[in-house]
Amino acid sequence: MIDTSKAEIQTRQQQAGTEDPSERFTLRLYVTGTTSRSMLAIKNLQRICEKHLAGMYDLEVIDIYQYPEAAAHAQIIAAPTLIKLSPAPLRRAIGDLSNEDKVLFALNLPANDRYGS
């Protein structure tokens, strides 16, 4: 589990499962401390990513209580908020990320399929 109570941005790097770095997903999740909703969003996103993007993603979790300037810069108006930075297009999802189909839609992935399979 990612400890968002630390005073630094937590980055979780997954080992590349592909030779092409352009195939990697770059994700940023903005959370509000260690609230139950934030922790649930982290858990749900990790589960979905491991199921559909195993070894093909980088996830950065940003606590907006610790880094309010990062939230302002990204124009975050609600948390948790997931931003898919790459591959294009940039997409967002807001909430605890418990609806897998909606998260897959935000990631621009087909539902019920593993990316790259």
Image (spheres, rainbow, N blue to C red):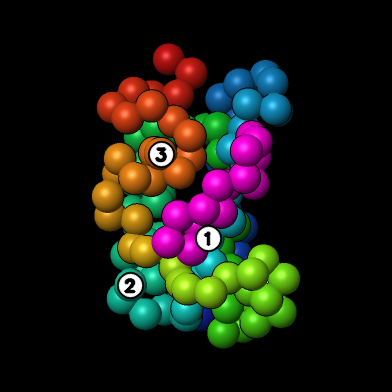
Q: Is residue 34 above or below residue 113?
A: below
Residue in front for this viewpoint, 60 or 97: 97
Residue, x 46% and y 72% (percent of image)? 79
Quadrant position of residue 72: bottom right
Neighbours of disc 1 within 10 Å: few (<14), some (14-19), many (20+): many
For marks 1 and 2 on the same chain, the one whose residue lies earlier in the sequence: 1
Q: Position of residue 40 (x, y in %)?
A: 32, 65
Q: Which residues fall within the magenta stretch?
A: 81-94
Residue, x 48% and y 18% (percent of image)? 116
109 left or right of 100 in image: right
In this orientation, does residue 4 appear? no
For marks 3 and 2 on the same chain, the one whose residue lies earlier in the sequence: 2
Residue in front for this viewpoint, 86 or 9: 86
Q: Any mark on residue 74, and which?
A: none
Q: Residue furthest top?
A: 117
Q: CA distance from mark 1 to mark 2?
A: 12 Å
For marks 3 and 1 on the same chain, the one whose residue lies earlier in the sequence: 1
SS type, badge 1: strand
Q: CA distance from mark 3 to mark 2?
A: 21 Å
Q: Any mark on residue 105, and which?
A: 3
Whether residue 34 appears in magenta in the rendering, the answer is: no
Q: CA distance from mark 3 to mark 1?
A: 16 Å
In this orientation, does residue 95 appear? yes
102 left or right of 87 in image: left
Amino acid bearing label 2? Arg
Q: What residue is disc 1 on?
A: 29
Q: Position of residue 12 (x, y in %)?
A: 57, 53
Q: Is residue 31 above or below residue 81?
A: below
Q: What residue is disc 2 on?
A: 37
Task: Check whether the beta carbons of the residues at disc 3 and disc 1 lie within 8 A of each other.
Answer: no
Amino acid bearing label 1? Leu
